[in-house]
DNA sequence: CCTACCGATCGGTAGG
DNA sequence: CCTACCGATCGGTAGG
């Protein structure tokens, strides 16, 4: 047990060790991400994942050590997926209103036609965990807080550069954009509302309307 | 079994029958509502409720017949609670912008200082069930859809009465108000953000801004 | 990565 | 409303 070297079962098989193990780990996380998007992270069960993947329960939990460690790993993977889809394509743009508008476009695309069956993973788990305690909740808070701060930061730059009206509060922008995204996610997932993406775009355009007198005016007069 | 009259265990006790049964049912639903606001309706377990209430599991499930019937009953109770707190106080106002503004005030109050530990019950279960199937999801869709239609209807009246600008889309109003509420709920529950209610009020005031030229102007110039 | 197994708990039922 | 019980499943471990 604590006697140093354990028996290495993988030495029994001639196939590559670490590589295949990483593949299995990835397959488990990938499947768990799909399931958790609809069932939540707490709704995950080792037995269902094992059935889905043709593994034993021990084979599912082994690479992670516990269900909670799996939950945390899946959350990280989902965050990478969101960042790659929404932020990465616009990250190289110059900070400010331009990048914020581009990010919202990507964000709305991502919610309107989500890669996971349950829609926005973060929204699902943030709602699931906002009344619980522990490491998973803490990780959700960190992830969602980081995203809101990204929005806040670009809004702040935009205000200083006079790309947004001077009386705009960056925290208000982040708050409202987040609400638009959540309302869109609910409209798509709960009501299959095909008009919701257009509504989200209109709402976001108003939140990010440039100062009057810049190019086109905001509305009439 | 199907032989007509079963043994009536309550006849054994001298206490009133239907009245006490209704009390027990109410106590179970009340406790289940508190738990479900944080753990979700699927997260409810008969065992935990039994422990909380000093009942047996059979005593918990008996009055409802199944966990699903309990879930549906709890959902209805939560809807009544929301309606009583948010809509009932303003229902007698005249339809239109005035009532919509008053309802949003109540709504924001309700989310800022929620009576249930998990915050907005409907938001929690709507997110929990948006990717599932069955009677509970269907009931959530009905409840949330009804609320959005209430907002939509008053916005429509307000536009026709020129209490809102003529180019305002009532569905857009309902969509945006719902987003503000969801963002507020998340800010309170996940971040304990004391500034969020004020942000929600500001955002709602903008969505419900009267036509320019009515009393005060919307912003500058 | 497996088989075999653990105690705990799940929703629910029989019968009174 | 209870006790006593059902089969199924939960997360997880031992050992290889």
Image (cartoon, coloured by chain):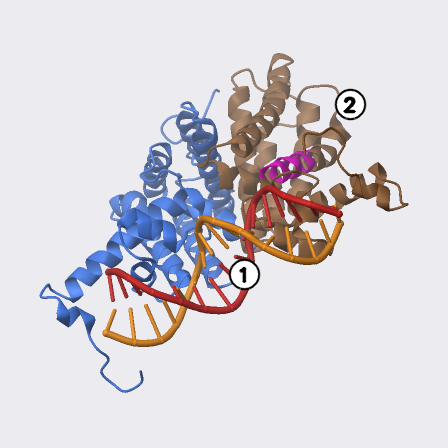
Chain colours: A brown, B blue, C orange, D red
* Foreground residue among B107 and B32: B32
Q: Main secondary structure of the magenta part?
A: helix
Q: Is residue B197 magenta?
A: no
Judge by depth and name the residue closer to the eye, A88 or A138: A138
Q: Tell me the quarter of the image containing the N terminus of chain B.
A: bottom left
Q: Is label 2 in a helix, a strand or a loop?
A: loop
In the image, is residue B78 above or below residue A18?
below
Determine whether the residue tagged by mark 1 lies in a helix, strand or loop. loop
Q: Point out the stretch of residues depicted in magenta.
A: A68-79
Q: Quadrant of residue B73?
A: bottom left
| Residue located farthest toward the right when viewing the structure as drawn | A14
Residue B20 visible somewhere in the drawing: yes
Q: Is residue A77 magenta?
A: yes
| Residue drawn at point x = 62 percent, y = 50 percent | A46
Per the image, the residue denoted by label 1 is B133
**From the viewer's perspective, is D16 left or right of B183?**
right
Q: Chain of mark 2?
A: A
Q: Position of residue A122 (x, y in %)?
A: 59, 38
Q: Hey, which quadrant is residue B12 in on the image? A: bottom left
B82 to A102, vertically: above or below: below
Q: Which mark is residue A92?
A: 2
User: Image point 40% across, 39% down: which residue?
Assistant: B118
Q: In front: B5, or A95?
A: B5
In the rendered image, residue A134, in percent from the top left (x then y), is placed at: 50, 32
Where is residue A54 drawn, in percent x and y? Answer: 73, 56
Residue sitting at 58 percent across and 45 percent down? A185
């Amino acid at each position: 047990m604590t006697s140093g070297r354990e028996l290495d079962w993988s030495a029994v098989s001639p196939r590559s060790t670490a590589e295949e193990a990483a593949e299995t780990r990835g397959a488990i996380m990938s499947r768990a991400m799909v399931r958790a998007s609809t069932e939540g992270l707490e709704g995950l069960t080792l037995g269902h994942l094992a059935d889905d993947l043709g593994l034993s329960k021990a084979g599912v939990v082994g690479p992670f050590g516990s269900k909670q460690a799996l939950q945390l790993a899946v959350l990280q993977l989902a965050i990478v997926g969101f960042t790659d889809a929404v932020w990465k394509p616009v990250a190289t743009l110059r900070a400010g209103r331009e990048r914020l508008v581009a990010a919202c476009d990507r964000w709305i695309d991502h919610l309107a036609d989500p890669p996971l069956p349950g829609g926005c993973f973060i929204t699902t788990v943030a709602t699931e965990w906002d009344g619980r305690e522990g490491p998973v909740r803490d990780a959700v808070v960190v992830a969602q807080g980081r995203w809101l701060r990204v929005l806040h930061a670009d809004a702040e730059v935009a205000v200083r550069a006079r790309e947004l009206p001077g009386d705009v509060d960056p925290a208000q922008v982040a708050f409202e954009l987040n609400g638009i995204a959540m309302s869109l996610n609910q409209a798509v997932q709960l009501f299959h509302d095909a008009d919701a993406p257009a509504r989200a775009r209109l709402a976001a355009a108003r939140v990010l309307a440039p100062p009057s007198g810049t190019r086109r005016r905001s509305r009439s007069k």
